[in-house]
Amino acid sequence: MTERTTAATSAPAVAPAGHSRADSRKASRAAFVGTLLEYYDFSLYASAASVVFASVFFSGSSPFLGTLQAVGTFAVGFLVRPLGGVILGSLGDRIGRKKILVFTLVLMGVATLLVGVLPSYAQIGWVAPALLVFLRILQGIGASGEYGGAALVAVEFAPQKKKGLMGSLPGMGAALGGVLGTLSLLTVSTLMPQESFLAWGWRIPFLCSVVILAYGLWLRRSLPETPAFRAIEESNTVSKTPILDVIRQQPRALLTVLLMTVGQTGIGYFYIVFMGTFGKNQLGFGGTEVLIGLIAAQLANGILIPLFGSLSDRVGRAPVIMFGFLYSAVFAWVGISLLSGVGTPPLLYWVVMALGNGVGVAAIFGPMGAYVIELFHTQHAYSGLGLGREAGNALGAAAIPVIAVALAFDDTTVWLSVLICVVSLLGFAATVLSRTRTPSVTTPEDDTAPVSV
């Protein structure tokens, strides 16, 4: 049975009436604030891995090996995400979106707080990095169910003409959460001596995440279940085996999401993980200059994501996403070539970070929230996102920064440009091949016509 045939025989349920605009606004806030917390935690770890963890948890290694190990622990969080995506996605399709989003919030928040009190390598030896890896695994599992669930909540409450904009809010929350995480680390590092910062000051931002956790938990617990999920509950069409169903019925959609995610996260984390270590090790910048660059990259991304999401409601998702991939491929050659080595002015580094992660990645990530959801039937949309996106995360976000670190220590930049060009073109090709599709999410305002791409 082809996907086109399956789409006709497994049509999405029409959402029941009864949800108000207030519910839609609450869903938007819950998606945004919850993802803000998740990626405050996640990006705080990424920033700390770039400028702190090598000396705190891997001080027994050489500078190169310590950097590689620190970035490697960041990658571990992505390697476990496919498993978490399968489990949490399946549960989200069986018991509801809301319950899983509450769980992911608590898991991520607790893991982050524990990182903030973890002893250093100097205090407990190899046990310290081992515990760091374990907590990173918990963060990865929590994050594996977060973005897909938040995007589903936002899109399943949104009217048809605003799905692109509403679906971009989790991405915006992720980017701005990254800004807050990096800014908090920069603030603490600026206000205290470097010795104190490395000894204990870096822990403060991790502990402060409890404030956002409390607010996000309150907001999500008060959120009603999405109209689309209530529709399949009331029609008794909830899938008992959503993972198997999505693999059997929509393999092309899964492959599309996987390849697009490899491109999007590979490019994004190249800038916000690898380029931090590149600025420090190859360009000779201090921690402050590097953190400002990371803030510039994430702030530009967060500002532009909803603009590109809204644009996709008017011109279609695929054209905007394809522009983002092509821009990223071209800019990889231009931007990286401008960073020639020690002596590069920090301002140029900050501009490259903002234009690389801001324009290119935002153009991809903004429309993706709605785009990938529209690839799947409601009955297994969470599972499809969990499996496809998190497998892509493991290949893109986990592997690309580590590969880039190895390439950069060979004292050449041309292969860095080749690396980003390859993942960009991979995402572009996946988008082109996915343009014939059937929407899976409807609301009372929606018509039944296929969504234009």
Image: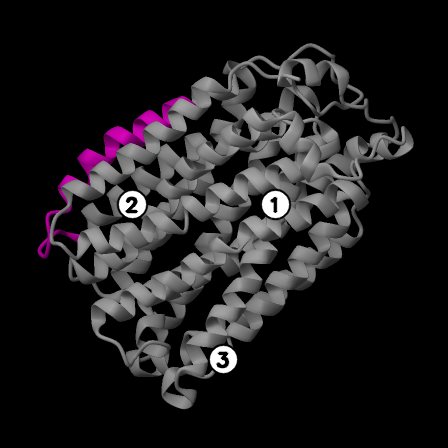
Residue ID for mark 2: 353
Q: Which residues are magenta?
A: 322-346
Residues marked 2 and 1 touching at CB (< 8 Å): no
Amino acid marked by disc 1: Phe
Furthest-bottom residue in view? Answer: 123
Q: Which mark is residue 118?
A: 3
Amino acid marked by disc 3: Leu
State the image quarter where residue 380 is shown.
top right
**Residue 11 visible here:** no
335 drawn magenta = yes
- The kind of secondary structure element at disc 2 is helix
Name the quadrant of the N terminus: top right
Q: Earlier in the sequence, mark 2 or mark 3?
A: 3
- The kind of secondary structure element at disc 1 is helix
Q: Which mark is residue 68?
A: none
How far apart marks 2 and 1 lie (CA) works out to 24 Å
**Percent position (x, y) of residue 8?**
73, 14
Q: Earlier in the sequence, mark 2 or mark 1?
A: 1
Near mark 3 (Cα within 10 A), the count class, few <14, some 14-19 or many ≥20, is: some
Residue sitting at 36 percent across and 87 percent down? 122
How far apart marks 1 and 3 lie (CA) works out to 29 Å
Residue ID for mark 1: 32
**Percent position (x, y) of residue 214?**
68, 63
In the rendered view, does 307 fall on the left or right side of 290?
Answer: right
Please tell me which residue lies in front, 223 or 271.
271
Please tell me which residue lies in front, 445 or 115.
115
Depth-wise, is mark 2 or mark 3 nearer the camera?
Answer: 3
User: How many numbered tags mark residues here?
Assistant: 3
**Percent position (x, y) of residue 402?**
31, 54
Is residue 140 depicted above or below 384 in this figure?
Answer: below
